Amino acid sequence: ARDRVPLAPILILSQYVEERYAGELLATGAAGVGYLLKDRVADVGDFLTALRQVAGGGTVLDPEVVSQLVTRRRRDDRLAGLTPREQEVLALIAEGQSNTAIADRLFIGEGTVEKHISNIFSKLGLDDAISQHRRVLAVLAYLRG
């Protein structure tokens, strides 16, 4: 809707928090936006107040939306701490590549790949004490980030 009418206020009323939509809604920096969860809008008066606020150029966000976006930002920050080479290695891990295949693809030694992977695990907070498979957890962080 913003493509056709850039100044149109937008209020999303949703059953669930969709981080992608909430992020896109707020990324434009435009005035007159809101994202509310249906099950938390119990009072018609509160809903109408939120609607008026958005129509007047204000911003209305459900606290759960804010919480999930902040959590997402923290995840993104962990990934942002990776070097460009570590990001490349993690992307190749996400493709299912072995250490040998990653080394061949990046023209580096297998020991160097192992060092990058160790750094990735460390920066993502995936230490040896974790009982789950760290490689899988690193890929999940990559996919969520």
Image (cartoon, rainbow, N blue to C red):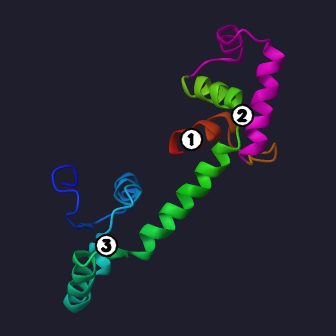
Q: Vertical placement of 32 versus 92: above or below?
A: below
Give the residue number, with chain letter if any, for mark 2: 83
- The residue where tag 3 is placed is 36
Residue at image x 64%, y 10%? 105
* Mark 1 and mark 3: Cα distance apart in space: 28 Å
The picture places residue 29, in percent across and down from the top left corner, at 39, 60
The residue under label 2 is which amino acid type?
Thr
Residue occupying the point 73% across, 36% down: 120
Q: Measuring 71% from the left and 34% from the top, which residue is drawn there? A: 83
In the image, residue 76 sits, relative to residue 46, either above or below, namely above
From the viewer's perspective, is the residue at label 2 or at label 3 nearer?
Answer: 2
Residue 68 vs 48, above or below: the answer is above
Rounded to the nearest angstrom, the CA distance separating label 2 from label 3 is 37 Å
User: Residue pushed farthest left?
Assistant: 4
Which quadrant is the C terminus positioned in? Answer: top right
Mark 2, secondary structure of its residue: loop
In this rendering, the answer to whether 28 lies above or below 86 is below
Q: Is residue 114 left or right of residue 95?
A: right
Mark 2 touching mark 3, by CB under 8 A?
no
Q: Which residue is mark 1?
A: 140
Q: Quadrant of residue 119?
A: top right
Q: State yes or no: discs 1 and 2 in contact (Cβ < 8 Å).
A: no
| Mark 3 crowd level (few <14, some 14–19, many ≥20, 10 Å Cα) | many
Tell which circle, 2 or 3, labels the residue nearer the N-terminal end. Answer: 3
Which amino acid does the dot numbered 3 rest on? Leu
Magenta-colored segment: predominant secondary structure: helix
The secondary structure type at the circle numbered 3 is strand
Q: Which residues are magenta?
A: 96-124
Mark 1: which secondary structure? helix
Q: Who is closer to the viewer here, 100 or 48?
A: 48
